Image (spheres, helix red, strand yellow):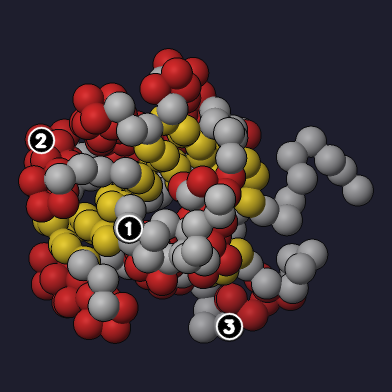
Amino acid sequence: MPQLSDALLDGRVVLVSGGTQGLGAAIAIAAVRNGADVVVTGRRKDVGEQFATDLAERSGRQVRYVQADASDVGQGQAAVAETIDRFGRIDCMVNCAGLTTRGTMLDTTPELFDEHIAVNLRGPFFLMQAAIKDMVARGKGGSIVNIITMSSHGGQPYLAPYVASKSGLVGLTRNAAFAHRWDRIRINGVNIGWTETEGEDATQRRWHDADDDWLEKAAAQQPMGKLGQVDEIADFVIFLLSDRSGVVTGSVIDWDQIIPGAHE
C-alpha cells in the first residue's frame, strides 16, 4: 500500500556535506520540505549554525550543523558519527562539497592537485564508507547521491585537477553501487552543468573578469534561456534519494542542456 504522506523522505535522516550554501543548502531545504531531518556540514561555523537554526524554525524539522572541512577525513567521519549518535541512524547522504579552483595541465602544482583530490574524491570516499558501514550494520538499506559535474566528460583545459578528481568520483559512484546493491544501498551521481549560485558568481568575477551583467549574458546564450537552478537540481536529488526512484543505482545522470558528443 502506498504511503499516505506525499513527502518523499518522510521520517528519513539525511546528511548533506557542503550543505550550508549554494546547491547543498537547496538540497537541505528540499529534504526538510519532504519530511526529513537533516544534518549539514560546512567549514564556516557562523554560517552553518545560522542556516540550521533558520531552517529548523521555518520547517519544524530537526536540522543540525556539524563543522567539517571536506578535505579532512577525520572531520567527515566525525560528522557521520554525530549524525548516528543524534538520530540513531543515517538513511541518506549527499556528497555536495566541492572545490573548483583553476589549474591547467601545465601549471597545476602537486599541492593544488592534492587539494582537489582531498575535497572532491578522498572526502566523498570516506564519507560514503562511514555511512555505508552504518547502513550495512542495520540491514535497512539506504541511498546516496554524489554531486559530480558535466566536466567529468572531459571538461575545460583550465579545470585539469578538478576534472581528474571528479572523474574519479564517477568511477567510485559506480563501483560502490555495484559493491552494495545486495545490501539494498542505492548510490547514484548527478553531473551538473553550469549552475546559477553565489559561488559561481564569485568564480566568474575572480577567474574570468566577469561584469555585473555576466549572468544575463550567459543565460541568453543557453538553449533554455537560463543556467541550471539549484532548487530544480535539489528536487531531482531528493527524487534519487527517495523510494520513488525505484531500483535505480550506479547511474550518473547528466543534468544539463549541453549534449556531450553532439555537434551543430
| Mark 3: secondary structure | loop
| Mark 2: secondary structure | helix
Q: Residue at x 51, y 36 (%)?
A: 188
Marks 3 and 2, Cα distance to the nearest angstrom? Answer: 41 Å
| Mark 1: secondary structure | loop
Mark 1 in CB contact with mark 2 (< 8 angstroms): no
Amino acid under disc 2 = Gly
Amino acid under disc 1 = Gly
Binning the other alpha carbons within 10 Å of mark 3 as few (below 14), some (14 to 19) or many (20 upward) gives few
Where in the figure is residue 1, as x and y percent of width and height?
Answer: 56, 50
What mark, if any, has residue 74 been given in the picture? 2
Q: Which residue is mark 1?
A: 11
Q: Is residue 14 left or right of residue 219?
A: left
- Residue 195 at least partly seen: no
Where in the figure is residue 108, as x and y percent of width and height?
Answer: 37, 34
Q: Which residue is mark 3?
A: 213
Q: Is residue 208 above or below residue 168?
A: below
